[in-house]
């Protein structure tokens, strides 16, 4: 098998599980093929291996493993859930695709059986315990197998798997119900999804480890549903209609017997199949976690710290020689790909880091009318570059900005909630709404459902008047944003920073003649006749907490992402304000903002000058400057200029702090784990499958030859 195909087979095996819901949402059967769907296309039985006989490593736990038949129906459902995408991605034929699916189904079952034997051999599960779990009467073979799998799961693991399969079923019925709910765009005045303001990464994202033991499948009659949230516009009638369609799809695809009691959904054989699949996935993940725990013990402090120091030294030497490679690495910097050193230069006999860094750019734009006026203006007198600086200055005074988050109210999803007492209102009592309550205020505590929204302070109210009306269960908003000037924005920025506990101090006041000055050029010296870009700085300042000379603490890159630190509070406030006002949407959800080089860039000249100046001053510096697009508020989030000449890196790896979430040590160690531990765990899975697959499985390819032959039948 070619490497690309092997990779795809492994990928298919990894993502399979709870795919029946996707299958149930489609109706592929156009003829009476139910008997065909029940054909066994493969069988897996690890007990055929010598390892389960005599003195074999798993001989003592042979009783926890049994033959597992794989049905043609499983192959079809996998194709619908995952295979079609893989086929398109790799450009495969149907022959390649269905053979790969057969391999992936067999791979999965080989590893599931291995996991059962591995847990029994190494973690105290017994043959007697397993046999007791599968003893007695069951409604189906799938129900019996699910009971056997459940034996290897603790209560939380089982509850999490139950939540997964119930949520999968609800999602499938939700999709059908949404098709029955008529939503008139004009009637409800929803903003089209394509026009909704960009959301912060992670907003309203459910925690991967969350589960709700009380979560239940909703068929239209139940009232106790746990944390299940009904789709917008749902009524018992629409849900029942969707549920009936769901059952119809099950029947069409041989997943529902004629005599089953459909009023008791979880007693149906289909649910047993879904539960079996979810428990298989849970056991696979449990063993992979065991592998990771075992492999992580090999990652000693000496090894991890040594690797960090070696990487820093290599980057220092390499990037100083090759700045192009450094700038490419800086552009891709993230918490899974750190740049630990920057080029260094010697100036006046003193070696120091070059002033590379990142800035957030908040653009408050000219209006269309102002832009047209600027375009039609005459060039400044004697300007060799055709600048229109004087005309632009006259227009800048009239630039007004508005809060861009109105569509977070009016889109199909309403993300707003009523603000609490701690919210920042700028002194305006009419500002009463915040956003992403689940991600901001409901994301703490054990088994929190939603991920905490990172680097987003979450207390900046919508800057405008919002009138909310309820009519016949429908919510309508009338939104009037407040217009603010550049001075109004700076007031909001400083006030919000202060409310968060990190005050901005102005280091360069607005020049008294800013809007009326006429001299934008050097009048003497080597640069005579060239543009003096320092003339465009409107105001500048720095977060006081990062100024050691005035009692602050120097910016510490290790704490940038740790909630509650000065570094993260300042970053989070500016990031949130960017989502509120920035019309440069390309800058939203960037890691630390735009990367800035101290050398020539492709940025507009005024922006380049101010961004380079801010980075040279260090993290926490802001500068306000115009371009022909409008006002730019530039905030430096990170800078190598903050690193002392004798300091190897802006980051410090501490093995003992690897468990402190959101610190650099945590992210760096997670990066090491991803490349070492996760790779080793995946390799152990692959080795286990390769060890048993040939001797312990049979594939009956003639029984799905009609699927592998679809290419020729369609030609």
Image (cartoon, rainbow, N blue to C red):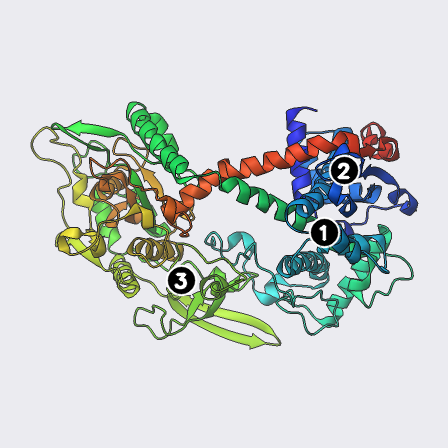
Q: Any mark on residue 475, and which? A: none
Whole-angstrom CA distance, mark 3 to mark 1, is 50 Å
Please tell me which residue is depicted at 54% across the width and 59% down the height of the picture. 191
> Closer to the N terminus: mark 3 or mark 1?
1
Q: Residues within 10 Å of mark 1 (few under 14, many from 20)?
A: some
Please identify the quarter of the rendering in which residue 121 is found. top right
Left or right placement of residue 252 versus residue 451 in this view: right
Q: Which residue is mark 2?
A: 52
Location of residue 384 with respect to 636 vertically, above or below: above
Tell me the residue that label 3 is attached to. Answer: 458
Q: Where does residue 153 sit, x and y in percent of width and height?
A: 67, 55
Instruction: Examine the rendering and report whether any part of residue 94 can be seen.
Output: no
Residues at marks 2 and 3 touching, judged by CB atoms closer than 8 Å: no
| Figure label count | 3
| Relative depth, front residue between 218 and 443 | 443
Asked whether residue 24 is in view, the answer is yes
Quadrant the C terminus occupies: top right
User: Decide: marks 3, 1 in contact (CB < 8 A)?
Assistant: no
Residue 652 placement: quadrant: top left
SS at mark 1? loop
Horizontally, residue 465 falls left or right of residue 297, namely: left
The x and y percentages for residue 584 are: 39, 47
Distance of label 1 from label 2 (alpha carbons): 15 Å
The residue that appears at 70% across and 31% down in the rendered structure is 691
Residue found at the very far left of the displayed protein:
524
**2 or 3: tag closer to the N-terminus:** 2
Give the position of the N terminus as an image quadrant: top right
- Kindly identify which residue carries mark 1: 126
Crowding at mark 3 (Cα within 10 Å: few <14, some 14-19, many 20+): many
| Residue at position x 25%, y 34% in the image | 598
Residue 543 vs residue 526: left or right? right
Q: Secondary structure at mark 3?
A: loop
């Amino acid at each position: 098998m070619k490497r690309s195909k092997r990779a795809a087979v492994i990928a298919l095996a990894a993502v399979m599980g709870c795919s029946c819901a996707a299958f149930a949402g489609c109706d592929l059967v156009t003829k009476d093929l139910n008997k065909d769907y029940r054909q066994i296309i493969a069988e897996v039985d690890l007990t055929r291996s010598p390892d389960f006989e005599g003195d074999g490593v798993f001989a003592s736990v042979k009783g926890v493993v049994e033959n597992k038949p794989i049905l043609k129906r499983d192959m079809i459902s996998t194709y619908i859930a995952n295979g079609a995408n893989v086929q398109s991605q790799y450009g495969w034929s149907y022959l390649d695709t269905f053979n790969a699916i057969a391999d992936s189904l067999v791979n999965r079952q080989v590893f599931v059986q291995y996991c059962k034997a591995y847990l029994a051999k190494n973690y105290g599960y017994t043959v007697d315990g397993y046999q007791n779990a599968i003893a007695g009467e069951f409604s189906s073979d799938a129900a019996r197998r699910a009971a056997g799998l459940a034996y290897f799961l603790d209560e939380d693991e089982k509850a999490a798997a139950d939540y997964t399969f119930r949520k999968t079923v609800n999602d499938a019925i939700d999709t059908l119900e949404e098709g029955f709910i008529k939503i008139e765009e004009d009637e409800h005045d929803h903003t089209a999804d394509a026009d909704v303001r960009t959301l912060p990464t992670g907003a309203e994202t459910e925690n991967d480890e969350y589960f709700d033991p009380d979560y239940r499948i909703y068929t239209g009659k139940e009232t106790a549903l746990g944390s299940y949230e009904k789709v917008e516009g749902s009524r018992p009638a629409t849900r029942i209609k969707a549920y009936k369609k769901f059952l119809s799809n099950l029947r069409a695809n041989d997943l529902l017997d004629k005599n089953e009691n459909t009023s008791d959904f979880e007693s149906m054989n289909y649910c047993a199949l879904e539960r079996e699949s979810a428990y298989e996935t849970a056991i696979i993940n449990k063993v992979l976690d065991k592998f990771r725990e075992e492999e992580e013990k090999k990652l000693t402090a000496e090894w991890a710290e040594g690797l960090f120091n070696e990487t820093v030294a290599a980057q220092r030497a390499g990037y100083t020689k090759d700045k192009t490679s450094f700038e490419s690495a800086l552009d891709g910097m993230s918490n899974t790909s750190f740049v630990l050193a920057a080029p260094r230069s010697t100036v006046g006999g003193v070696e120091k880091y070059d002033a590379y860094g990142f800035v957030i750019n908040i653009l408050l734009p000219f209006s269309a009318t102002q832009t047209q006026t600027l375009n039609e203006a005459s060039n400044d007198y004697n300007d060799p570059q055709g600048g229109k600086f004087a005309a632009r200055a006259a227009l800048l005074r009239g630039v007004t900005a508005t809060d861009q988050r109105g569509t977070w109210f009016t889109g199909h999803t309403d993300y707003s909630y009523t603000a609490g007492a701690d919210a920042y209102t700028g002194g305006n009592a009419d500002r009463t709404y915040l956003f992403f309550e689940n991600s901001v205020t409901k994301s703490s505590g054990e088994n929190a459902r939603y991920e905490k929204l990172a680097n987003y302070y979450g207390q900046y109210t919508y800057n405008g008047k919002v009138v909310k009306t309820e009519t016949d269960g429908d919510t309508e908003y009338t939104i009037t944003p407040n217009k603010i000037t550049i001075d109004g924005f700076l007031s909001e920025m400083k006030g919000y920073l202060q409310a968060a506990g990190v005050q901005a101090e102005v280091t360069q006041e607005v020049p008294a003649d800013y809007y009326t000055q006429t001299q934008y050029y050097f009048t003497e010296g080597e640069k005579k006749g060239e543009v003096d870009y320092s003339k465009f700085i409107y105001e500048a300042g720095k977060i006081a907490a990062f100024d050691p000379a005035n009692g602050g603490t120097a910016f510490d890159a290790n704490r940038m992402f740790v909630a509650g630190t000065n570094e993260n509070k300042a970053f989070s406030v500016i990031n949130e304000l960017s989502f509120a006002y920035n019309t440069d949407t390309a800058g939203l959800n960037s890691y630390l903002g735009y990367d800035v080089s101290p050398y020539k860039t492709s940025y507009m000249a005024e922006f380049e000058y101010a961004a380079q100046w801010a980075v040279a001053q260090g993290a926490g510096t802001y500068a306000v400057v115009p371009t022909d697009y409008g006002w730019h508020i530039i905030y430096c989030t990170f800078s190598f200029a903050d690193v002392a000449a004798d300091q190897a890196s802006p980051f410090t790896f501490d093995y003992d702090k690897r468990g402190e979430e959101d610190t650099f040590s945590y992210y760096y160690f997670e990066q090491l784990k991803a490349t070492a531990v996760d790779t080793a765990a995946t390799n152990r899975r692959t080795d286990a499958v390769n060890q048993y697959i040939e001797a312990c499985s049979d594939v009956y390819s003639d029984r799905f030859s009609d699927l592998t032959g679809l290419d020729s039948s369609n030609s």
